[in-house]
Image (cartoon, rainbow, N blue to C red):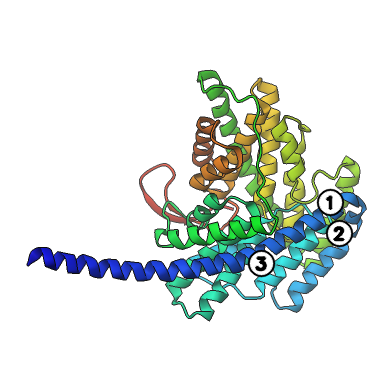
Amino acid sequence: MKPLFYIRLYGGVMIKNLKVFVRWGLFSIFIGLFVGAFSTLFAFCLRQVTGFRTENPWLILFLPAAGIIIVFLYRVLHYKNDKGTNLVLSTLHAKSEIPFKTAPLIFVATIVTHLFGGSAGREGAALQLGGSLGQQLGRLFRFDEKDQRVVIMCGMSAAFSAIFGTPIAAAIFSLEVGSIGIMYYAALVPCVFSSLTASQVAVHMGIGPDVFHLTDIPSFHVIPGLKVILLALLCAALSVLFCISLHSLGDLYRKHLKNPYVRILFSSAVIIGLTVLLQTDDYMGAGVPVIERAIEGTVSPPAFFWKIIFTALTLEAGFKGGEIVPSFFVGATFGCLFGQLLGLSPSLCAAVGMMAVFCGVTNCPITSMLISFELFGYEAVPYFLLGNSISYLMSGYYGLYHDQTIVYSKYKTEFINRRARE
């Protein structure tokens, strides 16, 4: 009788698991289609306005007017305490909810920011778009509170995948970014399904991923390995500087320029003045062309420094966008410069620097590894492993998102459960 009992028991468990799989599989595919389509439209609009601004750099003169429009939109819709991506992470910890108006607001505000030359990325908008749409779908289908968190992570993965074209990393990023040291594996299948689906939606709608080709990759030996270790140490420090610069300027603005209109007008004037002084449009928008040049081995030595300044001025004043692509810019340009100075492939160092700074500011080493592979291939894997792991360790508990929770210590097998430093 025992074999028959175990067969029935196992069969019952399998049927239960199959029901869960079908439920989440179908729903996450739906999220991937819906959020992927919306995010692909967003990515298409970003490309269009970026191309138009590149052909008409004088548009930056209207940045103050764009800033006033953004502040007005957030005020008229009674969304004065916008926490950006932090709101999405706070929702994962069940500390808040994402208002539905987040999606259209961040869509319009990010497009306006990029059109008129603000220095910002796109992933912050992607995570907010995906999280907001995901939560609304979860409510519509009457998911309970715990399942709604999974739905939000599905939405984040779908939006990140559609906009960045890195479905593997996108599936893991939403699991990893909220609580460092643990991952919500219950959301693994839903996030994988939604990420892959959204990626295919984007490709079929003509939004392909950014893929970079590295040159002059040396064999993995002691000398190039030591140089990459030094690069990773410097990138960890640079990631801390990036986070401190953004958060410190934000604190100064909130203390001394409390009126949001005055704040955004002042920052716009400084951005315009610096752009005229430097006589370049390299620091407008996300800066992907500069990243591409750095991967090819060409860089302006102070580019990484100026991108930090422009990004802090843009995002902390009230313009909308993300910090991740600017962190790519900072790491790639610094890495390229490092490679030129130390006689190691500037292309390789730009790629390693790009990923090491990203890892330092997000505290997401697994996602960093996966993005490295998806963007650059597998030939330089040992160098990426060194760069990402060292940057994760040496960047300490600093991070872009103050609602990100560091659950386990980076230095010991110890439960600490603290928020990332600002």
Question: Dot 2 corresponds to which residue?
Answer: 63
- Residue at 87 percent across and 46 percent down: it is 275
Query: Residue 177, how many percent across, how many down?
Result: 51, 55
Q: Looking at numbered disc 2 in the image, what kind of residue is underneath it?
A: Leu
Residue type beneath disc 1: Ile
Mark whose residue sits in front, 1 or 3: 3
Q: Which residue: 45% across, 75% down?
A: 145
Q: Name the N-terminal-most of marks 1 and 3.
A: 3
Q: Position of residue 181 (x, y in %)?
A: 42, 51
- Out of 342 and 33, give the one closest to the viewer: 33
Query: Is the residue marked by circle 3 packed among few (<14), some (14-19), or many (20+) residues within 10 Å?
Result: many
Q: Residues within 10 Å of mark 2 (few under 14, many from 20)?
A: many
Left or right of 11, for residue 106: right
Residue 296 is marked as none
Name the secondary structure under disc 1: helix
Dot placed on the residue nearer the N-terminal end, 1 or 2 = 2
State the separation of the CA atoms marked 1 and 3: 31 Å
Residue visible at 48% across and 81% down?
142
Q: Are marks 1 and 2 in contact (CB under 8 Å)?
A: yes
Element on which disc 3 rests: helix
> Marks 2/3: CA distance?
26 Å
Q: Residue 38: which disc?
A: 3
Look at the image and tell me in which quarter the N terminus lies. Answer: bottom left
